Image (spheres, rainbow, N blue to C red):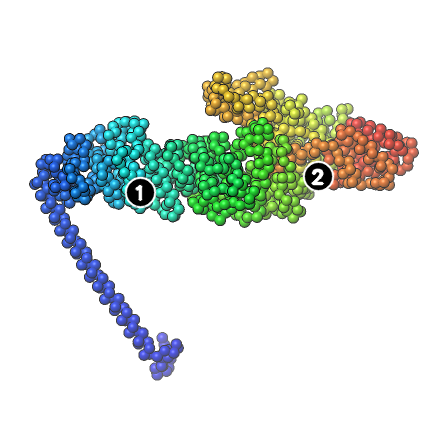
Amino acid sequence: MFFSGDSSARKRVDLGGRSSKERDRQKILEQARLERKRRLNSRQQNSAALKIQKCFRGRKDVEAERSKMREQFCLTFGKHCQKVDRNCFNSDSGFLQQLLFFFKAHNSGDFEALVQTCRLLHRFVQANAGDVVDLFAGMDYKSKRAIVENRVKRLAFACLQAVHHNRNQLKDQLLLSSECPSVPAVILLEAVVVLTDPKLPWVCKVVGYLLQRNTFGLLRDIVITAKQSTMDRAANKELSSLGHVLILIASHVGQQPYSCSNIDPRSSFSVITSHVGQQPGQQPCTCTNIDPRWSFSSQVLTIPFLWQLFPHLKEVFTITGMSKHYIHQMALCLHSHANVLPDDLSREFPGYACLLGNILETAMAALSQPNSSFDMAIDFAVVSAFMLEALPPIKSSNGESKGNSSLGVDEMAIDEECVEEGMNRDLKQQIINAIDPGLLQQLVNVLSRGTSLLSGSPKDGPQNKEVEAVGAICAFLHVTFSTLPLERIMTVLAYRTELVPMLWNFMKWCHENQQWPSLSSLTAHLLGDGPGWLLPLAVFCPVYKHMLMIVDNEEFYEQEKPLSLKDIRVLIVILKQALWQLLWVIPMKSPNAVKSSIILSVHRRNSVDFIQQRVSSVTSELLAQLQDWNNRQQFTSASDFHAQEAVDEVFISQALIESTRAYDILKQAPFLVPFTSRVKIFTSQLTAARQRNGPQAVFTRHRFRIRRDRIFEDAFNQLSALSEEDLRGMIRVTFVNELGVEEAGIDGGGIFKDFMENITRAAFDVQYGLFKETVDHLLYPNPGSGLIHEQHLQFFHFLGSILGKAMFEGILVDIPFATFFLSKLKQKYNYLNDLTSLDPELYRHLIFLKHYGGDISELELYFVIVNNEYGEQTEEELLPGGKDIRVTNENVITFIHLIANHRLNFQIRQQSSYFLRGFQQLIQKNWIEMFSEHEIQLLISGSLEGLDIEDLRHHTNYAGGYHNEHYVIQMFWDVLKNFSTDNQKKFLKFVTGCSRGPLLGFKFLEPLLCIQRAAGDASDEALDRLPTSATCMNLLKLPPYRSKEQLEMKLMYAINAEAGFDLS
């Protein structure tokens, strides 16, 4: 920018090595190219201008000719066609030729002329005894065929154009029937009806012409406008002219078209449908196929609530081949991944949802028809599944989404975030109501009848037909489970269809042959590259699980229904292998990641990751349920539920770390891990929790004086005031005997163990009124506890914390709980089969009702139950208005389960809730969920078998000169081995403060049992002493008795003295 001091010009050098001549050559070539492009654009612009001018002049000339023709038409035939006779429709007349030449739908004069023409057409057809062919062609149709067909199809299209263009002015007339012959819309539409009668020789030519001109698109606009009419449609039950047109045109599906001619429009459905069928002399439809985007299914079936407007069309669509044809057409579109649906009417009415609702509403009747086929059921299942997948999850009327929260990962939360707010409520309800038990029953039965799977596993493997049936029904039901409420459909799938045996025979063959075929190319959008067993398990598990909730013990164990015990053992292997694959082998996103992806895209909630998560959930639930059945009455080894890979120490150590696969397995499928391994994990969790509270325990130690004869009252008054943190800390007890004197002994832990045993024995005693016993002497909360104790709920909260404290400290207590009460510690729901423990007589009566062969209504039972607590009878309704609802064969299953629910869940709900709150103050929910109810009882009380004396001897230390081979020690073990089980328990309580040994054996007793010599010499005075103990150290102080008899006598006296700790 500034002068550098050098006035000479510098030579410019191209660093690329090119000369200036070369640069000039490239510049010239570029300029030549641009010039050629400019000349080309100029020629194209000139050519386009010429075409536009030519087209404009042509249109202008045509319009001029039309005006001339319009004037000539008025002069010749009259402005209102008053100069027309029946010969004007003949091919020799220029009447139709001129009218169709100048006709424009937007011209009011043309519209009026067309209406008058159609009015004349109706008059002349009636006068000619309905012979339309004679009216247009006379006696020589063959020679005039081309002219007649051309005029008829153009006339029919002109009528539809006229109605379409003027639909807003005619909207109150569009749904009228032929009973209103003077209305313009009816006149025009009835003209189309006359011209497309299936008995006419030109009908396929006319309909084909109409279809090629997007007639269904025109009819869609007309119907949508008709929906806006304010007329009362409920009173108009006749076949409307518009509906008649739809029937005639839509029925051209490659077979004999449906004919409504000679039928009174006021006829009932049964009269109309009786005219369906092939008539003599009629040929099948020869219409050419059209683009699916302009078909009846895309343009008309996507109109919301179509069948409310056209009930006659619904009937015809159902009973003829129309439904089969159009559903198959949609299936082909899915196969080719073609999007053929029109734009949504609004956010409230998505096209696919409207189409789904209309198809589902006719599906049950269509599948019930004699002409319903296996292939049609396949197409329907695949098409419906595809559209259901796109549907947002739908909540039931009571607000519960999808009926069963166990299906899927945190589905309730997903539903709240994912449901498409704009979708119309009535449209959702239409879909819910359409997928009713009858439809599912019919669909499954049609598909199962078309296969050989009901007769057992196929020897040569499932054929293509079987694979297609399984794939279609599994895809449909899986998406249905993911989308719709389940409360209305599970029972019918379990008990009114052959779905379970069908799927089981398929799965059994695949498992035995280690071959899972690809289900169907039409279900690939669901599975992707996922394993072939995913979809069958996704459907089989929830249905069979629901079946097990209803089946009774006799059916399951003796009649072996629905599956034999042998098959169930095979099923356990299949489920276990699949679950291990999903949780350990197959890489899968975490549940949170799956949930996030679902929220981002509702339409892909059935991705492979989601299906895997769903299958892992329902599979683990079914396996847990089968484990419960096995615990009631063993039919297979407990180890059959365990995964062999889940037993090593590495797995156990990983299971303690969150976000590891081992931790997820322990949380979702704990039965895969052996019980002893889970106990070790549980013990580690308790130890870590005690250590977290250990440092503060030294400074926050709580000491309580407890009177032995008032142990429950004193414990409740003092311990119930402790906070959760204090309960987790160290608690020490001093006993006061009947004389009001503090007992000897310093509580180093042993006295507290003794206190825990005594407080639980006193509080859970049925004489106290808080608990009752079953016939098997198992404890459960007393439903009438409030009649005995005013503070009964506070007592239950306290007892929950006492039981939690015992488990937290690793103290076993001898309290046998009923299984249905232990399930409340896991916040589980009890079902009918749990009633055998509570009330066997009531259970027998309910099973009698379940299998009653007569008319149950004659038994005069109602939906009420009578409670009898301490002589006070109260009547409760099982349902709102239940005293007026009689039990019938249709609702007896509901009645049975409401009775079971009342006794097992409702009556003890308050007591169980307060007990659980106290229990969870010390034992976290995720700790206890690792165990079944049977295993929880073992955690509480230990094994019911006697003490393992050899295990105790193997893990005993000696002091004061004793050793394993000492003669006193030899006598001691011989004496202890000969004790009764009760005396062995008393000995263990005497030494350790607890009558039960550690759950995993005495190896885990802390500290190990120690036998110490109690006297320095063997004098008579020393040998007259009784054995004593220090329970805080698990220490037995044993004098060196000279004989086995003397040792047995002294030891027996000591353990039965029940002198508290005064002996020490």
Q: Point out which mark residue 1000 bears.
A: 2
The image's mark for residue 712 is none
The residue sitting at 51% across, 39% down in the picture is 458
Label 1 sits on what residue type? Answer: Ser
747 with respect to 214 (left or right): right
Quarter of the rendering containing residue 994: top right
* Image x and y of residue 1057, in percent: 80, 27
Residue type (three-letter) at the residue carrying disc 2: Leu
Q: Residue at x 22, y 62 (%)?
A: 44
**24 left or right, relative to 878:** left
Q: Residues within 10 Å of mark 1 (few under 14, many from 20)?
A: many
Cα–Cα span, label 2 and label 1: 72 Å
801 vs 268, left or right, is: right
Nearer-the-camera pick, 686 or 699: 686
Does residue 197 appear to the left or right of 976 in the view shown? left
Q: Which residue is mark 1?
A: 295
Q: Earlier in the sequence, mark 2 or mark 1?
A: 1
Label 2 sits on a secondary structure element that is: loop
Residue 957, given in percent of the width and then of the height, sits at 80, 41
Report which quarter residue 308 is drawn in.
Answer: top left
Give residue 641's position: percent from left, percent from top.
61, 39
Is the Cβ of the residue at disc 2 closer than 8 Å to that at disc 1? no
Residue 747 in view in this figure: no
- Find numbered disc 1 in the image and state the secondary structure of the residue it sits on: loop
Which quadrant of the view contains residue 508? Answer: top right
